[in-house]
Image (cartoon, helix red, strand yellow):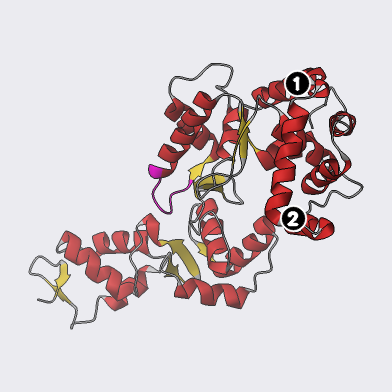
Amino acid sequence: MATLPFKPKQVAKQLLAELPDRARDVLIGRYGLGSTPKKQTLEAIGKKYGITRERVRQIENYALGSIRKSDAFKEAQEVFDSLAEMIEAHGGIVAEADFLDAIGKDESIKNHINFLLVLGDLFIRKKEDSDFHHRWFVDEKLAEQIHESLHNLYRDLDDDQLVPEGEFVTQFLKELGDLSEKYRNEEIARRWLSISKKLGKNPLGEWGRADSSNVRAKGMRDYAYLAIKQHGSPMHFSEVAKTIAKLFDRKAHVATCHNELIKDKRFVLVGRGLYALSEWGYTTGVVKDVISEILQNHGPLTREELIEKVRNERYVKDNTIIVNLQDSKLFRKTKEGKYALVS
């Protein structure tokens, strides 16, 4: 947590003292600066005073403007300079929630810091939109560079692509191009990544598009995909269930896990209860289907060649492959003793 060189509540109290009672009360309610950190809506404050929401907004703007013109505001310049230095130390542009969390867990303190940011002339706030969270910055040119680079990073990702965090951060820093050395480090890059609403990190620390099921895992199938992907080779469905419970702390019944894997095209049954990811190149279907596809792709093959290629696709015994080759409706032997598809 960041150590504050000033007391936010004390500073805010001195600034609010410049206002008439109602204007002060409006700011206290709007920014959660009172005995409770709960922020009040324009409507709630309006009902209290018997005025419209728009009138409350006018009073709020008047109150902020009055503080900025006061001597107390000028005397608090060191406080605003300190906040600017903190934002700079965090990378020059910060996600609002992350920055306030870095200051502390006390909601009242967060509200007071937010109030000071709103007041300060040094700070620019951009409201959240479809691409980014609420964020604060002091250098508009830097902010534009970060925004553009985050857009490009998202654009270059495939829909379901996952990238290990270290590799993703390196890719991001490269995308930023000409950047001051004081910002060129992984910690700041991770903070910048958190500004984006379109990029996300899954429970295994891999980055991708936030709307991808590989990132925002929701159900058994998504967690199974991540479990098998991390394992790197086919897994028995019972092991998949155990891994889901271990990695993600989610209940995963073995039978349910098996049923869900069967229904999802991301998985291929490659042996008795063994599942692989289809993206690894495994052929779907039963052993006969695998043999047929291999012969179609490679032409006639000897028994040994076929067994080797099928074993690369399925965890089955040699005899199972040989038995399937006896289906005369699908397969035939050539004069050279090789197996081929029936024409």
Which element type, helix, strand or loop, lies under badge 2? loop
Which amino acid does the dot numbered 1 rest on? Ser
Using the image, tell me which numbered label, if any, was put on residue 41.
2
For the residue pair 196 and 334, the one nearer the viewer reads as 196
Residue 281 in picture, x, y percent from top left: 34, 57
* Drawn side of residue 75 relative to residue 336, left or right: right
For the residue pair 254 and 226, the one nearer the viewer reads as 226
State which quadrant residue 325 falls in. bottom left
Identify the residue shown where x is 47% and y is 66%. 275
* Drawn side of residue 172 relative to residue 7, left or right: left
**328 is higher (above) or lower (below) than 271:** below
Cβ–Cβ under 8 Å for marks 2 and 1: no
* Drawn side of residue 134 relative to residue 168, left or right: right
Q: Point out the stretch of residues depicted in magenta.
A: 155-162
Q: Is residue 328 visible?
A: yes
Using the image, tell me which numbered label, if any, was put on residue 82.
1
Q: Between disc 2 and disc 1, whose residue precedes?
A: 2
Which element type, helix, strand or loop, lies under badge 1? helix
Identify the residue shown where x is 45% and y is 27%. 176
Which amino acid does the dot numbered 2 rest on? Thr
Query: Looking at the figure, which quarter contains the N terminus?
Result: top right
**211 is higher (above) or lower (below) than 128:** below
